[in-house]
Image (spheres, helix red, strand yellow):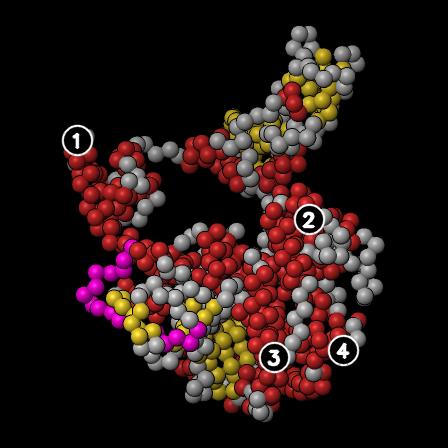
Amino acid sequence: MSKYSCESFEKLEEKVKTYISDFEDLKLIETSYKYAYDKHFGSKRLTGEDYITHPLSVAYILTGINADASTLVGALLHDTIEYGNADPEEIKKIFGEDILSLVLGITKINRLNFSGDSESVINNQRKILVGLSEDVRVIIIKLADRLHNMKTLFVLNEKKQKETAKETLDILTPIAHRLGMNSIKTELEELSLRYLKPDEYYDIVERLNATKAERDASVAKMIESVSDLLNKHDIKHEIKGRSKSIYSIYKKLDKGKRFSDIYDLLALRVFVNTEPECYQALGIIHSKFKPKPNRFKDYIAMPKTNMYQSLHTTVFGVDGQLYEIQIRTYEMDKVAENGIASHWSYKEHGSNKAAIQSDMEQKLQFFKSIMELKQNEDNPEEFVKSVKEELLKNTIYVFTPKGDVIELPNGATPIDFAYKVHTKVGDQTTGALVNSAMVPLDHELKDNDVVKIITSSSSTGPKREWLKFVKTNQAKTKIKNFFSKASLDENIKKGEELLTKELKRQKITFNEFEENLDKTLTNLKLGSLNEIYSNLGSGKINLENVIDAAFKPEKDKEEKMMEKVQKLGTKEADKDHIISVAGFDDIKVNLASCCNPIPGDRIIGYITKGSGISVHRMICPNVAKLNERLIDVTWNENKEKFLTTIVVYASVGNDVLVPIISKAASNDIGIRNVVNNKNADGQAVELGVIVKNKEELFKFINNIKNITGVKEVERLIK
């Protein structure tokens, strides 16, 4: 089976669970699969497979780039409107507005006809494609959709195969390249070449196969040699042989190069942990293997426009053969393969710490401002907004007086241009010449304008009113940063004065305060005394916060965790609304405190004298032997939380309480009370926990069982 095929939901689910653990997300993915299965039931693809295998495979491809749950749901549902006759309102009701927008976006794109020979027509159609996408995930789903369709292109006639292959090369692979999604781009290119120019494709395949054994042996020797070299210098690393893509070989041959002149047929990729180690490894390799002149590229200091970072060098290696060596960190490799798709971080893991700058060789800069924003603004929504506004919208190309090309969004001004060139140029801008004519600083630039920025070293800096007309987030961020920095000294001074007065008022010496500085910084989550001053001066913290952080007794780790968890899920359910009693519409209901039933438990009602119905678990010994005054009760659907009790048995000497409380916090489970009974044989931790249902409780219990020292966990019935 192809690595891009998925014939069952179980296979997809297994892959998804390697990086998504949230129960609600997994449930949503399963629900979307069942919905798609129902809508496509009975439909077949031209391959003879059930139609559901296509959306399953598209979603499976996206797991390769760790797509988030919403994107996977969009992938599973992407054909339900066009081919499954699904009602958009129904999708919205079940899955929400966000998912519906993804499905509608794919539906619109699929209805476009992209064929065309003219380069201007092709460029225009690319803009139409990305312009239709209000969410970058629509484009990413479309690329995965096309990749799976290309894997089954053999079922179409030759004419349709060539049309689809040409459309893919003309429209979709450039977009995959622009988004930095190299792994999908490479697959699309090679599949397209196979159908568009099969003779050239298979000729290259045969040439590669003919030299494969020899190349593999040479690469293995080179890997061993380079690895030994790096080990001697204590650089932790991993090395892989790298295959040149068939399409890139075709492009070089098409430009007149001979097969023997393609240096990177013998290629290695070296992975290290940090950016400095990339440069260390490069120097070490060059110390033994002579580099070929003019073959070194530093894409770390000057990344490509699609965020690609790596060091490239070609050296004379073992047996005197030329080897192309790429050196990068593991994080750089993730971005190199998945590009913008590596930023599912806008939902999950955080920032790309690499300093992304413009690639002056290609003279395109559409990622620079977005990456700078990412470094300065840790706001996921702002990052996505920037991608939409600056990457996927129409752009213009203007020139510096030296002929360098700068890419800007439509409506950009000389101030945007200045900050693209350099922060200092932007800060010191006093005027601008466009095509040798003086223009106001809010002038809208046009394609092919030649822009010269007039600066003055005596300038006091940018003007606040510039924020009203600049278009790029880079310029906005730089201007805001300037004024933030300018006000920093003022806030530090003000904060120092406030703290000094307060210490005197409370008869605390500064030396006493300074002795507790590390504790104060830890409690306030700040990095220095000046940060305390600046936060005081700006009003972000008050004097009471600072004094408490310095002199209040610290709570131990267990107390802090308990406080946090006790805030979670403390609202219990309204019992009268979550239980239905057979034959009664309005009767008082109580959940028995002896067994604390929760949704998912099998339950029975006991008619009390004067206190309504007491609801017990079926296995509760307090009702197990009763035959009279019992009544059938059932759970109603609800979103409330319920109290129940568990006991954790652990060995002596293991601190299990803190990790238990930590797991409760990470699973959004509240803890009402804790009783820790210890003796010589072990300890029994009794916990009153607040959960949604039995499924959530059992998931929590299984998590606890993985804690070192825990022997057993059971629910308590008193």
Q: Name the residue type under label 1.
A: Arg
Which quadrant, please, contains the C terminus? top right
Q: Whole-Å distance between the Cαs marked 4 and 2? A: 34 Å
Check if residue 450 falls in the magenta segment: yes
Q: Which is nearer the eye, 3 or 395?
A: 395
Q: Are marks 4 and 2 in contact (CB under 8 Å)?
A: no
Specify whether residue 608 is in view. yes
Q: Whole-Å distance between the Cαs marked 1 and 3? A: 79 Å
Which residue is denoted by mark 2 in the rendering? Answer: 88
Location of residue 27 in the rendering, given as x and y in whole percent from the top left corner: 66, 44
Location of residue 303 in the rendering, given as x and y in whole percent from the top left corner: 44, 71
Per the image, label 4 sits on a secondary structure element best described as: helix
Name the residue rendered at 24%, 54% in the picture.
486
Measured along the vertical axis of the image, is residue 701 above or below residue 17?
Answer: above
Which quadrant, please, contains the N terminus? bottom right
Tell me which segment is drawn in magenta.
Answer: 447-464
Question: 10 Å neighbourhood of mark 4: few (<14), some, or many (≥20)?
Answer: few
Q: Whole-Å distance between the Cαs marked 2 and 3? A: 36 Å
Which residue is denoted by mark 3 in the rendering? Answer: 118
Badge number at residue 505: 1
Q: Whole-Å distance between the Cαs marked 3 and 4? A: 19 Å
Q: Quadrant of residue 619?
A: top right
Which residue is denoted by mark 4 in the rendering? Answer: 159
Name the residue rendered at 19%, 34% in the picture.
502
In the rendered structure, which disc, 1 or 3, sits on the residue that comes first in sequence? 3
Q: Name the residue type under label 2.
A: Pro
